[in-house]
């Protein structure tokens, strides 16, 4: 059997919107991106509602709209969903969205997938992380040209290996704090 083509499924899930993306493991540019209005689609706390109403339709959209994707039966998908709210045991209860639970382990095991559903069956791994943890790690990848100083000259006064903070408003106010370990790796 031929080695499967691996795609990365990403999601930025907040109280208002879910922004889904599909990527090749070989490229930083998304192959497909689609936005969903959560209050229109995630209407009540039912087990598996997120994967049935957002992930499966998104993946179907990917294969229907992008002819360059490998055939579905030759694909494995690795998912990482950045979700607003506290993460515990690879799941989030979204207090700002009807207390819907999004469970990465259940998604990877297709616990709530309709029988015979072909798209969710391709997901091999699904990791849930807090949305602002994702923002923090994303900030670590910024180039100097992508930064905007609020106070002129302040960048030259900052220790690049020191702690980092990321704060931003969405449906709520998100924040994260990254500190370096002994090797200078931020976590």
Image (cartoon, grey):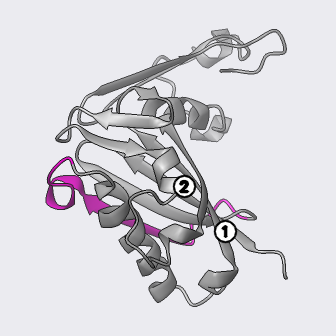
* Part of the protein shown in magenta: 27-45
Label 1 and label 2: CA atoms lie apart by 11 Å
Name the residue at the bottom extreme.
Answer: 67
Up the image or down, 47 lies above or below 132; here it is: below
Residue 75 percent across, percent down from the top left: 67, 75
Residue 14 visible, this orientation:
no
* Disc marking residue 108: 2
Residue 174 percent across, percent down from the top left: 36, 26
Residue 140 visible, this orientation:
yes
**Which residue is labeled 1 in the image?**
76
Left of 163 or right of it: where is 43?
left
Could you tell me which secondary element the residue under label 2 belongs to? helix
Quadrant housing the C terminus: top right
Q: Which residue is drawn at 40% across and 70% down?
A: 56
Residue 138 percent across, percent down from the top left: 58, 38
Left of 105 or right of it: where is 182?
right
Left of 95 or right of it: where is 145?
right
């Amino acid at each position: 059997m031929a080695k499967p083509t691996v795609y990365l499924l990403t999601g930025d899930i907040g109280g208002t919107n879910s922004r889904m993306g599909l990527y090749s493991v070989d490229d930083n540019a998304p192959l497909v991106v689609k936005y969903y209005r959560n209050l229109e689609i995630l209407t009540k706390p039912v087990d598996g509602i997120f994967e049935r109403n957002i992930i499966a339709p998104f993946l179907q959209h990917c294969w229907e709209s992008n002819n360059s994707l490998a055939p579905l039966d030759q694909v494995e998908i690795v998912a990482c969903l950045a979700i607003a709210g506290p993460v515990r045991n690879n799941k989030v209860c979204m207090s700002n969205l009807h207390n819907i639970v999004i469970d990465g382990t259940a998604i990877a095991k297709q616990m709530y997938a309709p029988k015979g559903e072909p798209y969710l069956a391709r997901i091999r791994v699904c990791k849930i992380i807090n949305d602002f943890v994702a923002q923090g790690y994303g900030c670590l990848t910024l180039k100097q040209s992508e930064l905007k100083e609020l106070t002129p000259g302040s960048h030259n006064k900052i220790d690049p290996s020191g702690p980092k903070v990321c704060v931003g408003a969405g449906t709520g106010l998100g924040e994260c704090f990254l500190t370096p370990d002994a090797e200078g790796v931020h976590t």
